[in-house]
Structures are given as structure tokens and as C-alpha cells.
Amino acid sequence: MSSNKKTKKTSGTGKDWTEAIIKTLEKEDGRPLNYKQISSRLGIKDRALRLEISQFLEKLLKKGALESPANGRYRVPGVEKYVEGILDMTSTGAAYVSLQEEERDIYISPKHVNKALHGDRVKVLLYAKRKNAKPAGEVVEVVERHKTDFVGVLEFNKNFAFFRADSRKMHTDIYIDTENTLDAENGDKVVVRMTDWPENANSPFGQVIKVLGKPGDHQTEIHAILAEYDLPYEFPPDIHEAAEAIPEAITDAEIKKRRDMRGILTFTIDPADAKDFDDALSFKVLENGRYEIGVHIADVAHYVREETALDKEAYARGTSVYLVDRVVPMLPERLSNFLCSLRPNEDKLAFSVIFEMDGNGKIYHKWFGRTVIHSDVRFAYEDAQKCIETKEGQLAEEVSILNDIAIKLRDARMKSGAIAFDKVEMKFHLDEHGNPTGVYTKESKEANHLIEEFMLLANRSVAAQVGADKNGKPNKNLMVYRIHDDPDPDKLEDLSNFVKRFGYQVATSGTKKISASLNAMLKEVKGTSEANMIETLTIRSMAKAIYSTKNVGHYGLAFPFYTHFTSPIRRYPDLMVHRILAENLNGKTIKGGSDWEDKCKHTSNRELLATRAERDSIKYMQVKFLEDKKDQEFFGTITGVTEWGVFVELEENKCEGMIRIRDFKDDYYLYDESNYAIVGERTGKIYQLGDRVCVMVKDTNLEKKTIDFTLVKDSSKPIKK
């Protein structure tokens, strides 16, 4: 028999809930609650009474007894603290907000991110800190969007489309009206601009601004990497036109303004495939037995004048970007590879630093100024290295003398506390379609160090010429420095504790002691299976080098004054330094201002984005390289441990992938964060950072740039070779 009973309606109690509500909210230390949470804390389950609590909350809000910082949530006034910072989203949807004045980042739960996206500057309601709890809060306002353009895949529904970003830190789809899809097809990789996020909408609205192509296609994925970091891969037509309009000829009038170095032996040493030659060396034996050594840098400032369209484009880009299969230049090809490039057997305009030195590297005199040069020989690094090793070949004697001086300059740097980061780089052999066919190592040898030492010498000399007085003390002149602060003590302590597991020692106090111990450790780790991992972790323990008008010196190089002067074809700060030096030599002083520091921050940020794009292109090529190698076994080293699995770097080719926790079939493994390990629940078996394992490729994903491994067997081979 069916029941026709109606649900009994509970009437309001008429009770004054003020005291109970206030006491409940006071216990939350400023954390706002909605009516359901408050009811739950009061032990109220009845729906009608919960609605009564909701109505009472609104009355208290109108009276000013409560406030509502977020829609539908309440708290006691006067306990809030607001802070601003940058939101760092995690792959889980939770986030952290970085605050300079706070010792620890502020944790934001996924439900309290409130329409903020990764990188946004946000206003955060900081909850009162509870004992032994991490600082927490919630986003109450997006102060400034970090970005509005996103790269991902477009998918069509019946009446609309939606966009899913490639980035794991983007946790919301974007709604796209079919009129705003730019003729993209279902499944295309596109760039979407977020245009609005209505108050009551779960997802933001947007429009397609560029169609990149089909996911997995080589050109599509490379262009997607560039678009992700706002790195343009084409120059606008007007920029090409401006570059083409620059005259090629060097006039006699221009030569008369400069020191003519065309009769002095001059040469370049660059990678074999280089086209933009920023720098050249000249060499001359003087009558007093000393040497005149010139460091000549392309005079880009002569061709790229301030506030022109070319200058603005170069500033916007900030730097050239070196992906695995291409270079995205800061300047159009006519400038970067032709007019400004110090090509052999051509007269070229340069900005130079000329040293009078002896064979021990002692400097007796320096000259700074604009020159005209003529490069006699173009060496690849391999050619110069052969001269050094065999003492034979074209200019072997001159190259050998310069190398001997460079060795002494390097030794002096090391004794002063410089750190020797000579990390081996992995490079790819590519076919005509840009597909990787092999992997090889690129290691710095004496020829590389020769050029490096003279470029470092020029850079620090220019920095001191402008920024230091006659006694080597800082003056008030404006200068753009390349600065590198001291290591973070906590990161250094973590590094020291970590390398002890492998039998290495790193000092954590005393500037020279730290540097000496780092150099000793980096030298000892060379050639071991854990070398790449430890070198990478050591670099990460250091502060990031940036551009600034505020000089703190360069810790890694042990220079009190340092700048970037030697690569104006590919770095905008070098072009800024050229202009400052020119004014300085003319007896003028450029007055400092916030705009110069803003330029330093902009170019530092562009450099960071370029570095990330370069890393992504390497990761993409690693995935592509391993796509067809799923039947091969590789030995590797565990380089990272997370709750989801362990990262493994392959010894043979330095490709990195993950063995996921679920793919360990012999046991259920738990994450042991304090020991950088996962531990078998039943067997107690441990896999930890630095362990050597044998793996096979399980899966590769070009779009996500991920490699999944499966464990084949453990290696009984010891960690250290």
C-alpha cells in the first residue's frame, strides 16, 4: 500500500543563536565557514534548523556582528590578515602563495583557490596559524593575471567547444563559443585567450587566437612550446622591412670615428654550426714582450638604435631561444647572421676591450672603445682544440699562448672562490625532418674554456669600468649587472645532507670553504652514475643569476663586479650595457631610475621563459627518441622520488622518465619523504634516490612530454663507479 504521508515541516525555534555562532566562529581563528559547516559544528542535522541558522547568519551580517569575505561564508570581524603574493599551483589543484616576508609559503586548498590560476598575483585571507600547522589561507581576489593565453587542445560539443590546457597547473577548461574557434577542427592544438570569467560560471570564457595544428606533429609541438612561454617564432613584416633597410656598407666617415684594428690578427672560435658570431679575439706580440689581446664584440648598438621598432622588438623578446632543432633569434636574420655577425674575411664594426697582458695573465693596461675589425680565421671549437692538443695547424702558436693565459685566469678564479660548473650537455643528432636519430655528449674542453675566460675578463672589466671608482669601490653610476647571490643556507644544508649518502662532503659555512668543497665534490663526482643528478641538484641549491642595477656581486664566478657585454646579438641586457659603456666613455652618466630596474626584471624573466622552453624541447626530443625503443633495456639512476613513483635517468642517453608506484608489481610501496625512498609494505624493500635500476620503456606521450618506465630488475652493480 502506497503511503501519502507528507514530510513533517519543522517550524523555527525562535532561539537566539548569536552566542553559539560567535563562539563557533571564534574557534576558527578567522577561517570563514558556510551555514552547513556552522550547523555541523553545533551538532544540528535537521534541515529546517540549518535553514534557520542560515537566516540568522544573514541577520548578524546586516548588523555588522559578522562579515562575509567570500560568498556564503561568514567569520567574526577583526581577526583577518590579508597578504599578497604569487600563486603556485600544484598538479593536484592545491596551491601555495609565495610571500617574501613569510618564512613559509601559504597553503591554499583546491576549494579555496577561487578562480585564481597559476602565476597570478592574488590577495589572500591568511588564517590564524595553529600550533604545528602550516600557514593556510584562501584567495579572495585576483589582483593581476599572470597570463591569459594558453596552449592546449580544442574539443567540440554539439553547441559549443571547450579547451583543455596542456599545462598540468591549469585545472579548469575554457568555454569557447563556436563563433570564436577560428575554423579550428576537433582535436586541434590551439592557443586560446581567456576573455572573461563570469561571477557565477564554473569555467572561464575564451576564444581561439591561433591554430597550431594536430597534436603530436613535430612543428605543432615545437610551436606549442614557444606559444606556452609567449616566445614568438616569427618576426612581423615591419621588423623584417626595418632590418632590410639598414645599409650594408661601412662608410669611411664611420671608420674614422673608430680604432682601426683590421691589420691585427683576429679570429673567432664558435660551435661548428654557429651563424651568429658575437665575439672575436685579436692577438699581437708587443715590443716589450707582452701581448695585446683584444676582445671584440659585435657593435649591435650601431645598427639597433634606441626606441626604434627593431629595438622595441628585441626588448620584447629579451633573448634568443635555443631549442633542440632551431634557434629563435632576438634579432632578424639580416642582423644576427649577416650585418652584426663577425664573419671571416669581412670588415665589421665592433665594441672592444683591449688588454696589455703578460704570459701569466697579469694586466698592465686596458682600453675600451669602438673599433673596426677584420676576422682572418673562423675556428670551430674542434679546430681550436686540435691546435691546443697537437701544437700544429693554422695559428697553433697564437692559440696555444692564449690557452696558457686562459688556464692561469681560470686558476686565479678558482682560488678566489669561483665554482666550476662543467656539466656535460646531452645533444641530439637530427635528420632532415628534425627527428632525433642519436644522442651525444657535449663537454667543455680547453678551447671552450679559452673563449670563456676572455669573455669573463671582458665582462668584469666593463662592469668595473662603469660601476667602480679608481679604488675598486662601488660608485653611483648606473650599470646593468649580472648578479648571483650567495647560496640559500637551507638549500645548502639539504645538499650537504643529500650528498653524504654517496660519500661526498659539502661545507655549509665560510664562503671560500663552501666554494672549495663544492669544487672538490663536483670533481670527485665526475664519471659516476649519480654525476648528472648531483650536478643538477648543486646548481638548484644556488641562487638564480639575474640582471639588476643593484650590485651584489657574482657568487658563482667570485667577481665583485660582473655584467653581460659579450653577446648583444642574442641578449638584450648586453645591448643595454653597450649603450651605458658608450655614454661612460663619452664622459656622460646615465641617471638611474626605476625604468632601468624594470628592464632588468623583464629581461631576467624572458631569460627564464626561454630556459623553460629549451628544457621542454629537450624533454620532447627525449620522448620522441624513445618512442620506438620499447623492447630495449636500459640502466639508469633514480633521480627523484615522489608519492606517485620514482624518476629514473638513463645512463646511456640521459633521458628521464618515471616508474609509477602502481607499476611496481612485487609489493605495495609507500613514500618515505625523509629518506627520499619508497618502501615495500610487505617486503620492506627500498628504492631510493641514487639507486641503479634496469628499466624498459612502457609508454611515451609526446603531447604531455612524459616517459613511463617499467622495472626490469635491480642492479647489483654499486652506485659509485
Image: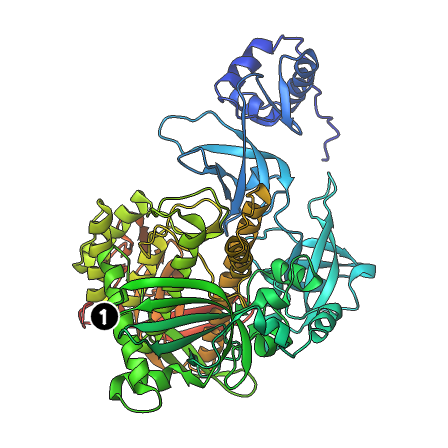
Residue 417 placement (x, y as % from top left): 25, 55
Regarding residue 183, the answer to whether it shows in the image is: yes
Q: Quadrant of residue 413?
A: bottom left
Nearest to the observer: residue 578 or residue 61: 578
Nearest to the observer: residue 68 or residue 118: 118
Q: Residue at x 56, y 9 (%)?
A: 19
Q: How many marks?
A: 1
Where does label 1 land, which residue? 528
Q: Position of residue 357 (x, y in %)?
A: 30, 68
Residue 215 shows up from this direction:
no
Horizontal and vertical percent for residue 124?
56, 33
**Tag 1: amino acid:** Thr
The answer to whether 525 appears left or right of 473 in the picture is left
Farthest residue toward the right?
179
Residue at the limit of the structure toward the front, as seen here: 287
Q: Where does residue 78 sit, x and y in percent of width and height?
A: 56, 16
Q: Quadrant of the N terminus?
A: top right
Horizontal arrangement in the rendering, residue 444 relative to residue 279 (left or right):
left
Picture quadrant of residue 162: bottom right
Q: Would you place residue 173 above or below residue 711 in this image?
A: above
